Image (cartoon, rainbow, N blue to C red):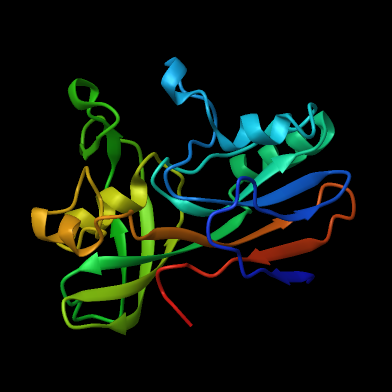
Amino acid sequence: MPHFVYNPPQAPYLDILYQDDDIVVLNKPAGLLSVPGREKKHSDSLALRLLRIWPNACVVHRLDLATSGLIILAMRKSAQSHIGRQFQQKVIDKTYYARVEGIIEKNTGLVDLPIRCDWENRPRQIVDFELGKNSQTQWEIVKREKQTTLVKLTPLTGRTHQLRVHMQQIGHAIVGDDFYASEFGKQLSPQRLALHAASITLTHPSTEQRITFDCPAPFMGG
């Protein structure tokens, strides 16, 4: 399996990690939209910046505004369809790292809670056992710190704000989260949400080989 590891610079305009005829892999900084928003003030986005270089690039998935890390765009329609099917079939593996409030006692766990949009408070999401969509997140301890815990998160589904809601629901919200963290948790990471998409594995649209990209979380050090 081809494996690409990248150590990103601090604050690039466009941080391209890999590119070929089918895909381009980027490291999205926290605070940048994946795609343009409806309002003019939200027009800047990773996709818009990339389209200035490759006008045919196509979006296949997104990361939250506040989340940093790996995101893949297709360079042509056939690749977009191929990767889109992989997401639908849930054969793309993604790993995130996060720093959360408090000390988690167990070493691993699974959060299985249905999520839906809180329409009156968009874009917030809430757990709803009647109307929510099936959502699962696996978590694993990386390091226990004085007031926080570093965790590895593996989403088994891909709901909006899934990782953020699930960690909050088990009493360990991600620090720096303006929507779901406590005031104490917000103060622990005032500059950004401590959530990073660190690894993604997919089948390459042309070679049909499994390929993995890694990009270390900037808030973990080392």
Residue at position x 26%, y 26% in the image: 122
Compared to residue 175, the image places residue 151 above or below, namely below
Give the camera-side residue of 162 and 144. 144
Write down the quadrant of residue 77 in the picture: top right
Give the mark count: 0
Q: Residue furthest top?
A: 39
Q: Residue furthest left?
A: 183
Give the camera-side residue of 175 and 122. 175
**Left or right: 8, with 157 as reference point:** right
**Left or right: 77, with 17 as reference point:** right
Image quadrant containing the N terminus: bottom right
Residue at position x 18%, y 55% in the image: 186
* Residue 145 spot, x, y in % from top left: 24, 82
* Residue 216 spot, x, y in % from top left: 54, 70
Compared to residue 74, the image places residue 8 above or below, namely below
Residue at position x 69%, y 41% in the image: 73
* Residue 100 spot, x, y in % from top left: 25, 66
* Residue 17 spot, x, y in % from top left: 71, 58
Write down the quadrant of residue 5 in the picture: bottom right
Compared to residue 143, the image places residue 111 above or below, namely above
**Left or right: 101, with 15 as reference point:** left
Residue 38 visible: no
Residue at position x 29%, y 39% in the image: 115
Residue 127 visible: yes
